[in-house]
Structures are given as C-alpha cells and as structure tokens.
Image: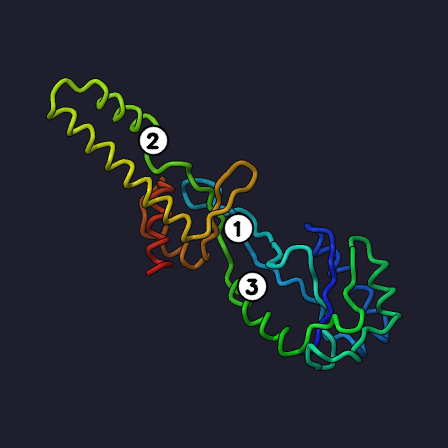
Amino acid sequence: MGAAFAIQVKTGREQSVKKLIEWAFERNEIAQQWVKAVHTFTQRTAKMLDDTGRLGKHTERPVIPGYIFIEMNYAVDDENRTAYLPHQLWHLVKSVPGVLKLFANAGQIIGSETFQELFERIEPQIQNEQVEVTVPEMIMEEHEMVAACAAFNDAQTVHEKRRAEQTLKRIEKIRRIYRQTLDRLGVFYRNGKHIVNIPKQVFEKTISRMPQPIPKPRLIKVMSMVMLN
C-alpha cells in the first residue's frame, strides 16, 4: 500500500464525503496521477428484526468513525518530511462539505508500512459482515425473580427458606454468567438498548439449529460458545 493522509470529517458523513472526493478526483488530472485510493474502512451490518432470525437491510458503518484516508501512489516511511499533498488537491479536499480538517502538513503523513499494518489489523472487520442483535436486559424474566424473592420472604420453615435461597442463588448465577458472556462479546449501549454484533456466518449457522421463535438469551449463549471456544 502507499503512504496516506488522514482527513477528519463529520461523524456519520464518512461515506458521503468519500463519494464526493472520489467524484472530484475522477475529474482532476493531478489527483489521477498522485492518488491511489480513498478509504473509509466500513463494515456491513444487518439488524436482526424479529424472533424468527429475519434480517433487515445491510448498512455500512465506519470502523474508524470521523476519518477517511487518502492513499497516495508513492511509498515513504513515517519520518519522511518531504512527502506532501499537492496544494491543488489540498484545496479540492478542503472544499468538500463535511471535511473538518486535513492532516497534510510536513510530518503528518502515515507511512506505507504503518498504513499497511492499520489495514491488516482492521481487515477482518471489513471483510466479515455482522448481524446486530438487541440484547434482552435479563436472562430471567422479572416475574421469576420477584417470585423467588417472595418465596424467600414468605418461607415458614428452615427447609423452605433454604430451597428459596438456592433458587435465588441459581438465578443470580445465571444472570452473572450471562452478563460476563455479553462483556466478552463486546456489548455496547445505543439508543437505550444493549446491542452485540455477531459475525453473519456464526449467526446463520446458529439459528439454523434453533427452534422458532428464537429466544434471544439462548441465541446469545450459543453464539458466544461458537465465537469464544
């Protein structure tokens, strides 16, 4: 890969800025001579829509939000101070709506080897399509926890108390293991919901073996075992 310059853009507009820059470069002879490619490093994701495993339309999200990269036709290292972006291209990029900052001063270039390492590190995310699954807050229904607490409080004998306590401990253990599983899968919070991204290949393999409707806690557990083992 060639050396590259980073461009800071408005978050959420990475793809539109990339398309505008590519459109401008296609009509510029200097760009065709100097520029190899424009990158956003996006990953395709589809949402799980319902408990049948049906997926929505694919969307693309940036792996590095807020940045795109102009890869040049030449290769230099990170310490090269002579590499530059022609001023005609600098002004062209700066004029594109959504561009916030262009890191094109001396010493701000991303060397060829460093850019290659960046690409290799995020390439698995780019190539592997993901399925976005909204995660239920708890693996146990709220009424089961309430019922277990009520049984513990209403217990009349030592035996009833011990049995209710064991039920509570079992529920808490399952919930704890479930939360640990979500942490290992990289659960994140967005718009009031907990979400986890699963490789599409793992998702499709898992739901093909499950009855419908698909219980999400069970789905998450099985997919985590496939991914983490």
How far apart are the two marked residues, 1 and 3, measured between alpha carbons? 14 Å
Mark found first going from the N terminus, 3 or 2:
3
Q: Amino acid at mark 2?
A: Glu
58 w.r.t. 73: above or below? above
Q: Amino acid at mark 3?
A: Ile
Q: Is residue 126 left or right of residue 76?
A: left
Label number found at residue 46: 1
List the residue tagged with mark 3.
126
* Point 33% across, 55% down: residue: 225
Within-10-Å neighbours for mark 2: few <14, some 14–19, many 20+? few
Q: Amino acid at mark 1?
A: Ala
Q: Quadrant of the C terminus?
A: bottom left
Whether the residues at callouts 3 and 2 have beta carbons within 8 Å, the answer is no
List the residue tagged with mark 2.
141
* Position in image of residue 105 (x %, y %): 80, 69
Q: Nearer the viewer, mark 2 or mark 1?
A: 2
Q: Is residue 77 left or right of residue 189?
A: right
How far apart are the two marked residues, 3 and 2, measured between alpha carbons? 36 Å
Q: Quadrant of residue 174?
A: top left
